[in-house]
Image (cartoon, rainbow, N blue to C red):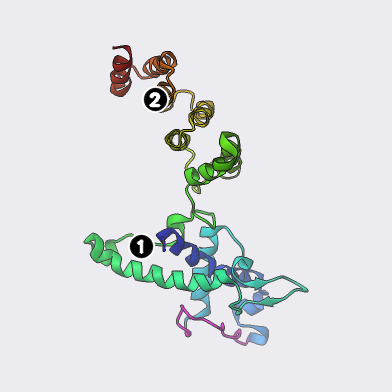
Amino acid sequence: MRLSHVVVALGTLGLTASLVFAQAPAGQRAGGPGGQAPPPMTNLQVFPKDTPRPQVLQTMQAFTQALGVECSYCHVQEGRGGRNDLASDEKATKKAARGMMLLAREINDKLPPAVGKAADSTTRVACATCHRGVPIPKQIADIVTEAGASGGATAGLAKFRELRERFFGGQSYDFSEASLVVIAQRANAAQKADDALAYLQANLEYYPKSVRTYLTMSAVHNAKGDKDTAIKDLERALQLDPQNAQAQRQLQMLKG
């Protein structure tokens, strides 16, 4: 099981409790009707059964923020007039969450000796380590490449722009100049040179002074047998960065 999948579970288990707390009337939050204590949480299997309610709620609220999903992602919660059974184990995501929480706990126990640091000096695995605000923490290069596998660069770029529109400025995905370059390199390795060039051309819309983009374009054009255009790509790269040793070396090889 991948480490990123471990963190999926850490977030998904906690969603319901945080919203239950947010939706409960003020009196019930403090101590229930008439000052009585609220009923204990039921079906706790990873948290110790005597864990104080506020501690569980606080932990789960952090999970919620890390994944950006709602309680119903793991729990049976249909709202007013519907079925609301937060203790139910019928959803597969909730069952998986428990296993992932235990696995994450095991990983955090093993991290200090693995990295040769004291426990208080070791960075621990948490939901936000991988998720950063999305429930499935896939890399943007994987998402776009999968979209382009059946629909080509048109579909891949549509997915990229959709994600950029929704998430740019946050930490969920990497929208730096490197992302589309990596995607283009994958396309080129899959012998889809035209797709690779489409990704690189789109990258220049966002980063018109990206030397790395022109270097990659040169490699793709040269692989296609278009040596003249490959030379022009390198010359453009050197206009942007005259001291770039890689561009200088490649240009010398092509002209030589």
Quadrant position of residue 74: bottom right
Within the magenta stretch, is there residue 185? no
206 sits to left or right of 117: right
What kind of element bears circle 1?
loop
**Residue 47 is inside the magenta segment:** yes
Q: Quadrant of the C terminus?
A: top left
| Along the viewing direction, whichever of 147 and 178 lies nearer the viewer | 147
Residue at screen point 23% across, 65% down: 113
Task: Judge from the rendering whether residue 197 lies leftward or rightward of residue 165; answer left or right.
Answer: left
Describe residue 115's horizontal placement relative to residue 158 as left or right.
Answer: left
Q: Which residues are magenta?
A: 36-50
Q: CA distance from mark 1 to mark 2?
A: 41 Å
Q: List x then y, in percent, for residue 136.
A: 52, 56
Figure quadrant of residue 160: top right
Give the overall secondary structure of the magenta segment.
loop
> Quadrant location of residue 33?
bottom right
Query: Between residues 210 and 38, which one lies in front from this camera angle?
Result: 210
- Residue placed under numbered mark 2 in the picture: 219
Q: Amino acid at mark 1?
A: Arg
Give how far across and how far down residue 175 sits, in percent. 49, 39
Q: Are marks 1 and 2 in contact (CB under 8 Å)?
A: no
Tell which circle, 1 or 2, labels the residue nearer the N-terminal end.
1
Percent coordinates x, y for residue 35 in the rendering: 63, 85
Classify 73 as above or below 152: below
Amino acid carrying label 2: it is Ala
Query: How many C-alpha atoms fall within 10 Å of the one at disc 1: few (<14), some, or many (≥20)?
Result: some
| Quadrant placement of the N terminus | bottom left
Q: Residue at x 57, y 36 (%)?
A: 152
For mark 1, what is the residue? 124
